[in-house]
Image: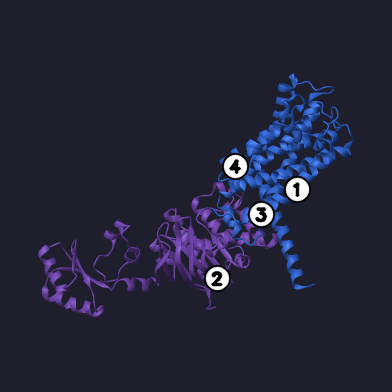
Chain colours: A blue, B purple
């Protein structure tokens, strides 16, 4: 093997090890914040109660059960909210001395950021499990087979990773944790509510309906409903992203990751406090 | 081993309109301790950040452990340890977990990281607290842990940015002991400080910077010598104005009275002292003490960083006594 090949292999191995170490660090940190764990686990339960029963009691879904319609939307929302958390966490990290420490170590420049992304994914799994349990408790059922249900969750997680990278970017660009919190929550609420996450956009005014239909969150929940077998009615005609929700979600997530992740790494390694 | 471990040539860096560094050059010999001495905002931290690859310089160049800090940053990082002003340990991790994480990031592997962690906890007297979360550590313990983390990979060059700022006297003394023991192990150290006694006690060479410029450098002794010649101080047993005046005339040009002592430049050093002792015996005034004194580093510092923007400094300086 040539010298450069040996060096490249070594670099790759060190880089993977660094990402592993960083992930491990974030997981230990996650474990040490029981209040945060409690909050993130309580959130889905609260959502099921709030939307499934408080609002859901007044929302009629043609030919279906609202709570079955809602659950894929809540899976999507939990993915969205984890992006808000990661933005705040990254902004907090950036304002602390620990970043300087990391940057004077011989670590692959991408490692810390990748570790953040991976640990967010892993820490999101218990939340998802609680949410699934809640869904099953209120009568939601994936009726299109276990294979498709698993595929649906993989798609949610993939989209979660993509949104997480956007959250990391916001965290890196924001001047403080408070700023990150404010900045990230605006698009999150718009994306979450002007969509088919909670209600069928068919009854919205025309201009809003167009936005809701083309909102990527609508594609994500539509993909979920399709794979869980919770769909009600055919997709609105002429909206390509809802006619092909799985392909749309997959492609969009990949594009976001491929574009945003390198920007984050670059931004992280060139950030100056 | 005589090659310098750190060389910096004409470093410059501005933050917007603020010129943090105008022109800073320094050489630190391998195995020695150099103190970068200056007030807040003098450019100490900026210099350290450039030398530790955290900040690009806008002018000049620097080498650390033989590698260029700009073009060979990754290689520099494998050879340096850095302890900054702010705590860099993770509060939600234990002391041991923090050190192990840093060890793994230095690619020591899990086993060696664990072994080094044990050694360092021992060395810095943190064994008892090793399983406690860092958020329960005292200020002094955090600094020691930070210092330990900087040493996990046996760095050739260690940077300490104000290692004792904000510590209580006990914590300070402990840090000094730790730093001295490192130096005896052959590590090159660049430390920044605003405390003269710290520079005097720890450093082989001192570089005084002010407003982004090097204003003086040398060993503590050289600095003292370059700023002022020694002076003679005669202290009488009591503050008798007539006697003080007589002694003042005796000492000649530049004599100053303060309290019950009179001081004046000793143009010929020890020879002057000899002469004065003879004269004093002839004069017959009750003398408490006669001595040859060197200007303190405090005075050196005030003199070299003296400028009109610091009116307070003027009154604190040695006046006409030395120059």
Frontmost residue, A190 versus A119: A190
Label 1 marks which chain's residue?
A
The image position of residue B32, as x and y in percent, is 49, 72
Q: Is residue A146 left or right of residue B115?
A: right
Q: Alpha carbon of mark 2 to alpha carbon of mark 1: how far?
A: 41 Å
Q: How crowded is mark 4: few (under 14 residues within 10 Å), some or many (20 or more)?
A: many
Count of residue discs: 4
Label 3 element class:
helix
Q: Is residue B308 left or right of residue A158?
A: left
Label 4 marks which chain's residue?
A
Residue ID for mark 4: A180
The part of the image, by quadrant, that contains residue A235 is: top right
The image position of residue A123, as x and y in percent, is 71, 43
Residue at (65% x, 40% y) in the render: A84
Residue at (49% x, 54% y) in the render: B140
Residue ID for mark 1: A255
Residue ID for mark 2: B63
Q: Alpha carbon of mark 3 to alpha carbon of mark 2: how far?
A: 26 Å
Do marks 4 and 3 share a subunit?
yes
Q: Which image quarter is the C terminus of chain B in? A: bottom left
Residue ID for mark 3: A265
Frontmost residue, B202 versus B224: B224
Label 2 element class:
strand
Q: Residues within 10 Å of mark 3 (few under 14, many from 20)?
A: many
Do marks 2 and 4 share a subunit?
no
Q: Alpha carbon of mark 2 to alpha carbon of mark 4: how far?
A: 37 Å
| Residue A112 visible here | no
Above/below status of A27 relative to B240: above
Mark nearer the N terminus (3 vs 1): 1
The image position of residue A212, as x and y in percent, is 73, 32
Tell me if label 1 and label 4 are in contact, CB under 8 Å.
no
């Amino acid at each position: 093997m040539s010298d450069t090949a040996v060096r490249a292999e070594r670099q790759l191995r060190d880089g993977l090890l660094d990402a592993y170490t960083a992930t491990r660090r974030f997981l230990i940190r996650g474990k040490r914040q029981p209040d945060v764990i409690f909050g993130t686990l309580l959130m889905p339960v609260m959502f099921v109660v709030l939307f499934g029963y408080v609002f859901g009691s007044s929302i009629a879904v043609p030919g279906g059960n609202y709570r079955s319609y809602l659950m894929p939307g809540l899976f999507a929302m939990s993915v969205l909210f984890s992006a808000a958390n990661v933005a705040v966490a990254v902004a907090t990290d950036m304002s602390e001395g620990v970043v300087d420490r990391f940057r004077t170590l011989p670590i692959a420049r991408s490692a810390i950021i990748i570790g953040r992304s991976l640990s967010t994914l892993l820490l999101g799994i218990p939340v998802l499990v609680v949410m699934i349990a809640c869904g099953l408790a209120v009568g939601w059922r994936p009726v299109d087979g276990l294979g498709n249900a698993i595929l649906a969750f993989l798609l949610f997680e993939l989209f979660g990773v993509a949104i997480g990278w956007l959250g990391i970017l916001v965290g890196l660009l924001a001047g403080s944790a408070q700023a990150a919190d404010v900045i990230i929550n605006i698009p999150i609420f718009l994306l979450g509510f002007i969509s088919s996450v909670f209600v069928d956009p068919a009854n919205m005014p025309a201009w809003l309906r167009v936005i809701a239909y083309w909102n990527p969150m609508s594609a994500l929940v539509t993909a979920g409903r399709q794979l869980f077998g919770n769909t009600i009615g055919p997709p609105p005609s002429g909206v390509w992203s809802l006619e092909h929700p799985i392909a749309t979600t997959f492609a969009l997530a990949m594009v976001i990751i491929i574009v945003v992740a390198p920007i984050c790494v670059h931004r992280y390694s060139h950030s100056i406090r | 081993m005589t090659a310098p471990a750190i060389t910096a040539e004409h470093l410059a860096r501005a933050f917007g309109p603020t010129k943090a560094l105008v022109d800073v050059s320094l050489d630190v010999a391998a195995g020695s301790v150099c103190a970068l001495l200056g007030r807040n905002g003098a450019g100490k931290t900026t210099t350290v950040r450039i030398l530790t690859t955290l900040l690009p310089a806008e002018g000049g160049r620097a080498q650390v452990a033989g590698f260029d800090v700009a073009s060979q940053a990754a290689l520099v990082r494998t050879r340096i340890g850095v302890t900054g002003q702010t705590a860099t340990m993770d509060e939600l991790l234990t002391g041991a977990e923090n050190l192990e994480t840093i060890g793994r990031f230095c690619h020591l592997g899990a086993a060696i990281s664990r072994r080094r962690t044990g050694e360092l906890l021992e060395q810095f007297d943190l064994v008892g607290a090793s399983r406690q979360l860092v958020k329960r550590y005292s200020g002094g313990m955090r600094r020691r842990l930070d210092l330990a983390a900087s040493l996990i990979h046996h760095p050739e060059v260690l940077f300490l940015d104000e290692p004792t700022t904000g510590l209580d006297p006990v914590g300070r003394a402990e840090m000094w002991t730790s730093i001295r023991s490192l130096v005896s192990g052959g590590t090159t150290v660049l430390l920044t400080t605003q405390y003269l006694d710290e520079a005097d006690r720890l450093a082989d060479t001192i570089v005084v910077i002010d407003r982004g410029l090097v204003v003086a450098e040398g060993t503590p002794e050289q600095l003292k010598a370059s700023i002022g010649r020694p002076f003679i101080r005669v202290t009488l047993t009591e503050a008798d104005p007539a006697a003080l005046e007589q002694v003042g005339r005796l000492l000649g040009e530049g004599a100053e009275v303060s309290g019950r002592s009179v001081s004046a430049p000793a143009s010929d050093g020890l020879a002057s002292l000899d002469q004065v002792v003879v004269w004093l015996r002839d004069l017959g005034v009750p003398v408490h003490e006669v001595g040859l004194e060197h200007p303190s580093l405090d005075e050196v510092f005030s003199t070299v960083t003296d400028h009109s923007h610091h009116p307070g400094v003027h009154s604190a300086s040695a006046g006409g006594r030395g120059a």
